[in-house]
Amino acid sequence: MTFPLPSQSKASNAAVVMITSSAIWGLLAAGLQTLSTIQLLLPVLSYFAPIPVLDYGHLAPAVSFLLIYGWITSGLLGVLMILVPRFSGIPFRYGRLLTGGAILWQVGVLSGLTGILGEGGTGIPFLPFLRPVTCIFLVSFLVLGTGITRGLGGSWKSGPLLPRLYLLGALISFPLGLGTAELLLRGGTTPGAVQIIVQLVWASVLQHLWLSPLALVLLFQLIPAMTGRATSSLSLGVLAWITTLGLGGWLSNTLASEGPLPSWLQSAGVVATLLLFVAVLGNGILLQPLLEGKMEEIKRNVALRFMSVGAWSYLAAYGWLAFLALPGVRQTTVFTMTSNTTQTLLIFLFWGSVLSGSVYALLPVARNMGWPSHPALTWHFWFTTIGAGMMVSGYALAGIFQGLALNDPGVPMGTVASYLRPFLVVVLIGQIVWWVGQMAFSSLLFSSLLKLFPSTAPMAVFPSENPASTTR
């Protein structure tokens, strides 16, 4: 399956700014994350090197912020600026304005990072930065989102419909969610109990109505393009889309078990999580035939390899959320490291894998370049996938044992902490392995942009005058 290629993409520079900045923020986040885990394992380090900027209380929100807004969001917006004009056939206009919006987003990330490291986070999940940073993000998104929606307008009657639906829902959800959270959580007039509800809803909007739909846009657009197969049932896909947008904002309410929330609201979160998992299974039914029998092609094409990992991680992440929502499990694992498992599954395996595959498939189109035939392509895949798998397994086992111990009154708190140590060692090793994989990708990215090495082999997704490849 191929798509019309506009004569010249004016979003090229903006896309490169977003993608290269994403790689840099991802490397920095991985380094800070490793340092924060070392501090958990060796708290004595804070006595020998008492640097407030690098203590765990500053590093934890900084890492979460960099991963969400710096690595994932920057990267996904960057690849969408390449993809959207190619499935709509409408090139972007005002390229300099788009590039300015991309640079402004990075200014927001830098401002948020310095504020968190200097003064600490705000304590609000996924909103650890101050109000000026929110304004920067909203202005930048107004520019970038307007450009993307313009390219979307002429595509409804041609090509797959599901990617357009998910993109439309995501582009509406982010500014509404961020703006509402800013007003209600920092406006000073919202009662405390309502603030807790707003925090949970905002966390759900960011994860399940913004980032997950953006990843689904790329899954449902690029996997059919690379495999030459179309999704089998539009009605099932539309039903899953309606369920995702209708229930995605409720999922985090399951984390309020035994908290100051009405019981019906907690129950609604559990029901929404289980029903959304059914919708995810529906999307899995649509994605599975696209990859069936394509193992040899997956082995050859690193972009398709990452996309397939992202598709299976999508099912695993929401299956894990459904497992945690079960009544007996929910009471045992709430406020444990199982929440770290969820974030690792979503960030590193689902969104991160889809982002990596999309960059490999789409960046050569925008820059008329190719990826060198280098072992670093394989290193990137295996190191990041194995590292993320180690993090997931370590956090999952730590959270389960932690929950069981916390619910046993005969187990002292010191013993609970000792239970976590071996699993945190596994997590630390996984973080280092993932970091090595990300460094391999960054070296490929910058060397390819600078055209330091020759590229060979044909490109997998779009036609081009000078084909390039995502193959090994």
Image (tube, rainbow, N blue to C red):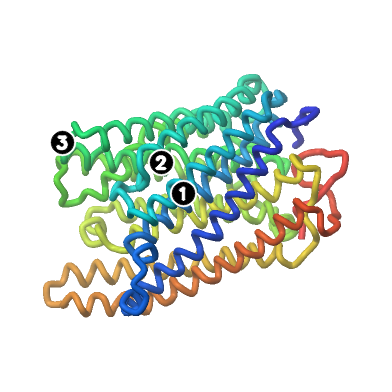
> Identity of the amino acid at label 2?
Leu
> Identity of the amino acid at label 1?
Ile
Residue denoted by label 1: 68
Q: Is 395 left, or right, of 366 in this rendering?
A: left
CA separation in Å, label 3 and label 2: 22 Å
Q: Nearer the viewer, residue 59 or 212?
A: 59
**Of callouts 1 and 2, the N-terminal one:** 1
* Circles 1 and 2: CB atoms closer than 8 Å: yes
Badge 1: few (under 14), some or many (20 or more) residues near its Cα, within 10 Å? many
**Of callouts 3 and 1, the N-terminal one:** 1
Can residue 144 be spotted in the picture?
A: yes
CA separation in Å, label 1 and label 2: 9 Å
Q: Quadrant of the N terminus?
A: top right
Badge 2: few (under 14), some or many (20 or more) residues near its Cα, within 10 Å? many
Q: Quadrant of residue 417?
A: bottom left
Residue drawn at the location 65% of the way across and 19% of the way down: 154
* Circles 3 and 1: CB atoms closer than 8 Å: no
CA separation in Å, label 3 and label 1: 28 Å
Q: Nearer the viewer, residue 204 or 289?
A: 204
Q: Is 24 left, or right, of 362 in this rendering?
A: left
Residue drawn at the location 72% of the way across and 30% of the way down: 10
Q: Nearer the viewer, residue 466 or 313?
A: 466
Mark 3 or 2, which is nearer the eye? 3
Q: Is 392 left, or right, of 127 in this rendering?
A: right
SS for callout 2: helix
Furthest-left residue in view? Answer: 409
In this rendering, the count of numbered labels is 3
Residue denoted by label 2: 206
Residue denoted by label 3: 191
- Residue 361 x/y as whole percent: 71, 47
SS for callout 3: loop
